Amino acid sequence: MSLPSPTFNSETARHALWHYGADGGYQPGSFTQKLMVAIDAADVVNKARLRACYPELVDAMNLAANQEDGIRRLQQGLGVTVAPLKCRCGDEDGPFTEDGLCEACERRAAVGGVA
Ligand SMILES: [Zn+2]
């Protein structure tokens, strides 16, 4: 079984990106915010019910949350360019800390030195 390919406008795509904390997101009104929390929490049956009323939002969120590279595809559809993660030392391999440091720089920072 294959679902029809998702169709949603750019505003909905930005709302989904905002919900997942991705670059290019745009905060919707409080109703849509709560609706997205409900969609996230819904089981399969309830998600299908919500999709009957809000197909665009459910599809956009499904793409962002459940498809490999979904966030990036939403961003590309919007023309959002996201700089690749890179440490201040130039390391692009990662993994990175939440501060954007590579492991080597994090170790240097942890011992109190300036990397
Ligand atoms: Zn580094």
Image: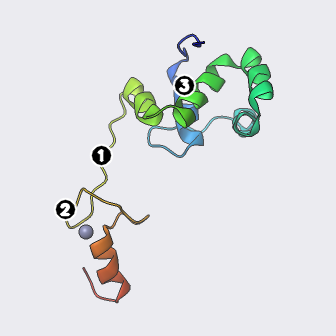
Q: Is residue 2 left or right of residue 88?
A: right
In the image, residue 32 above or below residue 53 = below
Ligand 1 is found in which quarter of the picture? bottom left
Q: Say which of marks 1 and 3 sits in front.
A: 1
First reached walking from the N terminus: tag 3 or tag 2? 3
First reached walking from the N terminus: tag 2 or tag 1? 1
- Residue 90, labelled with which disc? 2
* Distance between the alpha carbons at the discs numbered 3 and 2: 35 Å
- Residue 11, labelled with which disc? 3
Which amino acid type is marked by label 3? Glu
Q: Is residue 86 left or right of residue 45?
A: left
Name the residue: 34% across, 75% down: 106
Which amino acid type is marked by label 2? Gly
Would you say the residues marked 3 and 2 are in contact, meaning their CB atoms lie under 8 Å apart? no
Q: In which quarter of the view is residue 89 placed?
A: bottom left
The quadrant of the rendering that contains the C terminus is bottom left
- Residue 83, labelled with which disc? 1
Name the residue: 62% across, 19% down: 56
The crowd level at tag 3 (other Cα within 10 Å; few <14, some 14-19, many 20+) is some
The crowd level at tag 1 (other Cα within 10 Å; few <14, some 14-19, many 20+) is few
Q: Is mark 2 within 8 Å of ligand 1?
A: yes
The quadrant of the rendering that contains the N terminus is top right
Mark 3: which secondary structure? helix
Mark 2: which secondary structure? loop
